[in-house]
Image (spheres, grey):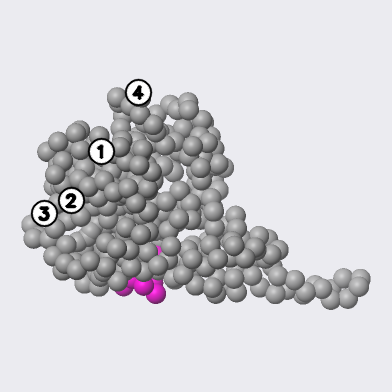
């Protein structure tokens, strides 16, 4: 694995297994949460081991970090809670280590950790990690700011030649702008893990009849960074009935087609993109998210993608 990369992990949730009595938690349901976190864990472990003898400053960033904890709800997924975690039911059966905790536990360690959460109350709970991981306290920064704004500003800074990172964008919905994704690519230093809201948001906005409201089209333009998605997913069709020919638009935006389109978009910005993003399914085997990987460093991209594709294959 090439040393010229930086890890920035942007995640929606972090957890611990015990002592969470009075803490607010974000709830998720189903094994897709486990799948996501396990793949992140494997990649971070491989990454720090590979770079332990390199002289780069290794940065880990977790945006949409929530409270620092998340809970796994067994027995079904409340899909409203995926988009609006505050609507989740309070009863849960299992707590899982989240991405922030996973990163802090990785050995050899990262040089620095940045956790981003816009909600100031949740940031206060993230600060508890500074006490729990006292030996790494001076390496942890908690930022109360919009993730797109902060990452955009971070990517514009100088000094990337001596720093490398992984960025795991794990939003609740369609909060991530393509402008942010492109800014990451332009650093030529960041490896990106991106939890794309395939089923919980994007496919829902693509109405079967193609009659998509202007505000929703703008959201799709922003997340894809292009407008040709409409022509890609809606094709004109003509049928003959008793009254003659009738022309209409037919939706061809299958989950697979949307995933392939996203991979193609990522390839316009990054020198390396995993060809096998992982669909994360609910209990009815319907895709909720698509876990994607892209590498911004041209030199390190081939080996980074090879490792990521192996992990995604699972």
Identify the residue under disc 3: 52
User: Given contact means CB atoms under 8 Å apart, are the residues at marks 3 and 2 in contact?
Assistant: no
Give percent across and percent down for residue 56: 12, 61
Spatial distance from mark 3 to mark 1, Cα to Cα?
27 Å
Residue 127 at x, y percent in the picture: 25, 38
Mark 3 or mark 1: which comes first in sequence?
Answer: 3
Q: Is residue 136 above or below residue 302?
A: above
Q: Which mark is residue 127?
A: 1
What is the quadrant of the N terminus in the image? bottom left
Placement of 77 over or under 158, stated as above or below = above
Q: Which span of residues is magenta-colored?
A: 267-275
Camera sees residue 80: yes
Disc 4 to disc 3, C-alpha distance: 37 Å
**Residue 181 versus residue 14 in the image, above or below:** below
Name the side, left or right, on which 54 lies relative to 112.
left
From the viewer's perspective, is 55 left or right of 7?
Answer: left
Mark 4 sits on what residue?
Answer: 21
Mark nearer the viewer, 3 or 2: 2
Q: Residues within 10 Å of mark 1 (few under 14, many from 20)?
A: some
Q: Earlier in the sequence, mark 2 or mark 4?
A: 4
Q: What distance separates the C-alpha of mark 2 from that of mark 4?
A: 28 Å
Q: Residue at x 65, y 63 (%)?
A: 212
Secondary structure under the numbered disc 4 in the rendered image: loop
Q: Secondary structure at mark 3?
A: loop
- For this rendering, which residue is in front, 155 or 82? 155
Q: Main secondary structure of the magenta part?
A: loop
SS of the residue at dot 1?
loop
Q: Is residue 220 magenta?
A: no
Viewer-side label of 1, 4:
1
Residue behind mark 2 = 112
């Amino acid at each position: 694995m090439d040393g010229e990369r930086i890890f920035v992990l942007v995640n929606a949730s972090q957890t611990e297994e015990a002592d969470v009595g009075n803490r607010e938690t974000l709830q998720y349901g189903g094994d897709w949460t486990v799948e996501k976190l396990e793949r992140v864990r494997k990649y971070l472990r491989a990454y720090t081991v590979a770079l332990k003898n390199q002289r780069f400053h290794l940065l880990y960033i977790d945006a949409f970090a929530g409270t620092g904890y998340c809970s796994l709800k067994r027995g079904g997924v409340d899909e409203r809670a995926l988009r609006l975690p505050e609507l989740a039911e309070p009863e849960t059966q299992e707590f899982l280590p989240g991405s922030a905790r996973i990163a802090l536990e990785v050995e050899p360690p990262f040089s620095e950790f940045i956790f981003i959460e816009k909600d100031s109350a949740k940031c206060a709970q993230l600060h508890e990690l500074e006490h729990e991981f006292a030996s790494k306290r001076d390496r942890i920064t908690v930022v109360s700011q919009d993730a797109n704004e902060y990452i955009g500003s971070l990517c514009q800074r100088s000094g990337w030649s001596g720093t490398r990172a992984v960025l795991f964008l794990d939003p609740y919905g369609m909060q991530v702008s393509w402008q942010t994704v492109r800014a990451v690519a332009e650093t030529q230093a960041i490896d990106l893990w991106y939890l794309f809201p395939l089923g919980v948001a994007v496919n829902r906005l693509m109405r079967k009849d193609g009659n998509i409201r202007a505000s929703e089209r703008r959201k799709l333009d922003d997340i894809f960074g292009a407008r040709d998605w409409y022509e890609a997913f809606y094709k004109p069709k003509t049928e003959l009935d008793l009254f003659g020919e009738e022309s209409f638009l037919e939706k061809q935006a299958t989950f697979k087609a949307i995933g392939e389109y996203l991979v193609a978009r990522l390839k316009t910005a990054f020198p390396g993109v995993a060809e096998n993003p992982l669909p994360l399914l609910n209990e009815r085997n319907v895709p909720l998210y698509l876990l994607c990987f892209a590498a911004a460093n041209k030199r390190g991209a081939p080996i980074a993608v090879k490792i990521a594709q192996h992990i995604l294959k699972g």
